[in-house]
Image (tube, rainbow, N blue to C red):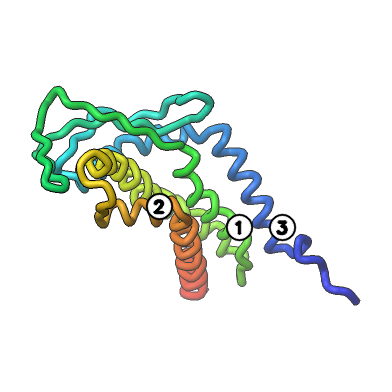
């Protein structure tokens, strides 16, 4: 008897279905789902960057794209490549980045949790419960750092081209596939945790 084609394997079917459904949901409701996260994301940016202050963080349109827009000022002197940028309450910088980029990791996480085989049925609702704080955590280590890196890239490009920093390296990692790595590692951890809790419960 021939083996079932790969695309018809239960795990692959769940993965494809989860990707399709989650992608469709985020395309339709991504902006509304991001709104409750804007204040925490802005707070993280203020916490990790003592030199800039968040004036506004909004979801808006840029051409045909939906983007996250950060407006920031300078609250402390910035030294870049020997150049000093003094704090000025009138100074403003506006950076934008596609909103869809920040839903990549949650989409992959949900798809992997749906595709991964479970030993017991109770693992499925446990995974769903664990996914909620995990999605928030993925968002907090992604969007604030990428947006803040755009502010620092402005200083770098103007006064120290070619230089880098830990923040810029982290943002580059996220944008070059790191989001998928984080989603995969988080999925592995949640699957293992759900299995562990199920065994303890049994």
- Image spot of residue 201 (x, y percent): 48, 71
187 displayed left or right of 59: right
Front residue of 175/197: it is 175
Residue, disc 2: 138
Would you place residue 186 above or below residue 50 in this image? below
Q: Which mark is residue 42?
A: none
Viewer-nearest of discs 1 and 3:
3
Would you place residue 116 above or below residue 140 in this image? below
Question: Which secondary structure, mark 1?
Answer: helix
Question: Which secondary structure, mark 3?
Answer: helix
- How many other residues sit within 10 Å of disc 2, few (<14), some (14-19) or many (≥20)? some
- How many other residues sit within 10 Å of disc 3, few (<14), some (14-19) or many (≥20)? some
Q: Pick whichever of labels 3 and 2 is earlier in the sequence.
A: 3
Q: Pick whichever of labels 1 and 3 is earlier in the sequence.
A: 3
* Residue located 48% across and 30% down the image: 66
* Residue located 47% across and 73% down the image: 196
Residue, disc 3: 13
Would you place residue 60 above or below residue 180 in this image? above
Please identify the quarter of the rendering in which residue 56 is found: top left
Q: CA–CA distance between discs 3 and 2?
A: 25 Å
* Residue located 61% across and 72% down the image: 119
Front residue of 34/88: it is 88
Q: Which mark is residue 114?
A: 1
Please identify the quarter of the rendering in which residue 68 is found: top left
């Amino acid at each position: 008897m021939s083996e079932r084609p790969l695309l018809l394997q239960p795990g692959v079917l769940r993965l494809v279905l989860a990707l399709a459904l989650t992608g469709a949901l985020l395309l339709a409701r991504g902006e509304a789902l991001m709104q409750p996260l804007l204040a925490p994301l802005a707070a993280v940016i203020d916490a990790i960057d003592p030199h800039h202050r968040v004036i506004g963080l909004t979801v808006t349109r840029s051409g045909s794209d939906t983007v996250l827009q950060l407006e920031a000022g300078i609250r402390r002197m910035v030294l870049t490549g020997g150049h000093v940028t003094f704090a000025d309450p009138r100074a403003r910088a506006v950076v934008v980045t596609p909103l869809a980029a920040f839903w990549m990791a949650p989409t992959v996480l949900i798809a992997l949790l749906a595709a991964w085989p479970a030993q017991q049925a109770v693992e499925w609702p446990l995974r769903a419960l664990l996914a909620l704080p995990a999605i928030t955590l993925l968002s907090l280590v992604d969007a604030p750092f990428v947006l803040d890196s755009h502010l620092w890239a402005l200083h770098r490009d103007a006064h120290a081209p070619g230089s880098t920093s830990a923040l810029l390296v982290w943002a580059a990692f996220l944008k070059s596939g790191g989001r998928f790595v984080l989603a995969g590692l988080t999925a592995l951890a949640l699957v293992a945790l759900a299995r562990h809790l199920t065994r303890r419960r049994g």
